Amino acid sequence: MGTKTLFQSGALGAGAALWVIPEVHHCRWAQKIDWYLNLQLIRSEHHKRLTPNNELIRIVLDNDWQWEDIATPDDAPLLVASQKHLPCQQVIRIPLKKSMLEWTESIIKIWDQLERPTLRVFLADSQRNEEFLSSWSTLYQGPMEVTLVPPLDSPEAK
């Protein structure tokens, strides 16, 4: 697996089409990225879905119309088009899981669904490169270029 570690000076530069970040409150890099995205990520974490008006529901039911309530779970990934704000096509927030292995599995699944664009992963403040690389090699055996950005305060980021 071809991996590259970016340091503070190059982390927000060009080089990958898809940037993966954890939640803003778990990653100082995500806070910086969110600033360039006009705080879309943090605002989405506080967004509450509106419930349909009772009158509307009554009309739908009275007329035997189809009603499909499409709700997304609170921990659903959020994909943001970012080409006008950052040197990448998309930023995706993938909430952290109980383990690095589960979080990495979520990244791989979404990366596959997006047809495997070039990838940059910003690690949460509590994560380390070795953990991610170990999880990735356990779950994915194919060739791949991934760029890792360690947490801002880690020795790896200096």
Image: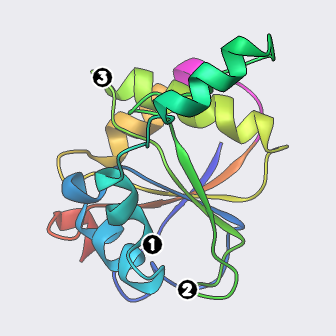
Amino acid carrying label 2: it is Gly
Range covered by the magenta-colored residues: 137-143
Rounded to the nearest whole Å, what is the CA distance between mark 2 and mark 1? 9 Å
Quick one: SS at disc 1? loop
Q: Compared to 99, does 53 lie above or below?
A: below
Q: Nearer the viewer, residue 11 or 52?
A: 52
Label 3 sits on residue: 99
Q: Give the residue at mark 2.
A: 13
Quarter of the image with the C terminus is: bottom left
Location of residue 13 in the rendering, given as x and y in whole percent from the top left corner: 55, 86
**Is residue 16 located in the magenta-colored stretch of the structure?**
no
Q: Indicate which disc, 1 or 3, sits on the residue closer to the N terminus.
A: 1
Q: Are marks 2 and 1 in contact (CB under 8 Å)?
A: yes
Q: Is residue 156 above or below residue 129?
A: below
Indicate which disc, 2 or 3, sits on the residue closer to the N terminus.
2
Q: How far is the residue under mark 2 from the one under mark 3?
A: 29 Å
Q: Which residue is mark 1?
A: 6
Question: What is the three-letter code of the residue carrying label 3?
Answer: Ser
For marks 2 and 1, the one nearer the N-term is 1
Dot 1 and dot 3 residues touching (CB under 8 Å): no
Q: Residue at x 38, y 89 (%)?
A: 9
Pick the quarter of the image with the N terminus: top right
Q: Nearer the viewer, residue 1 or 94?
A: 94
User: As shown in the figure, which amino acid type bears the numbered disc 1?
Assistant: Leu
48 up-or-down from 7: above or below: above
Q: Is residue 36 above or below residue 110?
A: below
Q: Secondary structure at mark 2?
A: loop
Image location of residue 129, percent across then percent down? 35, 48
The numbered dot on residue 106 is none
**143 left or right of 120 in image:** right
